[in-house]
Image (cartoon, rainbow, N blue to C red):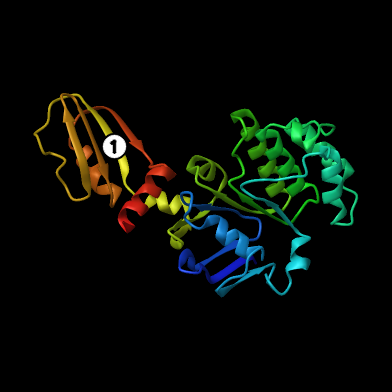
Amino acid sequence: MNVIEINNLTKHYGKSRGISNVSFHVEEGEIFGFIGPNGSGKSTTIRTLLSLIYPTSGSAKIFGKDCIEFAPEIAKEIGYLPSEVFYYDNMKVIDLLKYSASFYKKDCTKRIKELAEILDLDLTKKIDDLSLGNKKKVGIVQGLLHEPKLIILDEPTSGLDPLMQHKFFELLEEENKKGATILFSSHILSEVQRLCNRVAIIKEGEIVQVEKISVLKENNHKKFKIELKNKINKGFFNITGVTNLEEKENTISFLFRGDINIVMKKISEIEIANLWIEEPDLEEIFMHYYEKEA
């Protein structure tokens, strides 16, 4: 079952670019990454999906229901954390969270306390007295207090220190184990690589690729570094699929794309002292797609 289905979703702001023909789906129980630099259309897609703004054309469904027609019903089962959070400054944290919980018509008191303890959030402070990071913690608790089936996060870690980011990721993984589906939008690729199985890459309002991260890695260059026991003929590794070849004394390094058996067969013909093969990380893959499209 697909929890999110987006088909040719388009949003124009007059003559300004928004998003164009965005299509992807998020499966039930999945942590799905949505990546692109700032201004690429991530937030516009999410806001349109949540019916905070209306599309110019195209459609979106959550839980199989049209996002506009059934918006109030869908909202009860969604936890949303926007990229920037704004609150009533004079309210205490606990009062704000109780007010948020009242929309779901369920007692969230125990859940609020559990989340506040995990995130080290002082519930007695006024919003105005909180740092940017603590305001973001309030947003996280607000998004999770009703134990939603779908969690939508837009640049969720801005303002959080590294230790709190780690706790937050553990919290998300725990929610996912309990059955929550997560749409994780970010321009920080290491976060997406850690949490997500599949990813959509967006550029200038258009989707350029939707794929499993493992497949993206398989279809990209692998980095080879070889330490030689003996010298070999210059150009020995000038074979199809090899690029960025560097030869320095007893060390050779290059990028390879293609059937790995070909390059391994070539390596078997020489005496080596050591061998390193590295997978590309998501950042390298991301840059490859952006450079290719450009």
Instruction: In this rendered view, identify the residue nearer to me: 104 or 180.
Output: 104
Quadrant of the image occupied by residue 166? top right
Residue density around tag 1, few if under 14, some if 14–19, many if 20 or more, within 10 Å: some
Q: Secondary structure at mark 1?
A: strand
Which quadrant is home to the N terminus?
Answer: bottom right
Instruction: In this rendered view, identify the residue nearer to me: 273 or 31.
Output: 31
Judge whether 245 appears above or below 27 on screen. Answer: above
- Identity of the residue drawn at 9% across and 34% down: 234
- Identity of the residue drawn at 18% across and 24% down: 250
Instruction: In this rendered view, identify the residue nearer to me: 9 or 292.
Output: 9
Q: Identity of the amino acid at label 1?
A: Phe
Quadrant of the image occupied by residue 227? top left
Q: Position of residue 96 (x, y in %)?
A: 82, 44
Q: Position of residue 148 (x, y in %)?
A: 75, 54
Q: Position of residue 225 (x, y in %)?
A: 27, 33
Judge whether 28 appears above or below 36 on screen. Answer: below
- Which residue is denoted by mark 1 in the rendering? 224
Judge whether 2 appears above or below 275 on screen. Answer: below
- Identity of the residue drawn at 37% across and 44% down: 284
Q: Position of residue 172 (x, y in %)?
A: 67, 44
- Identity of the residue drawn at 77% across and 37% down: 127
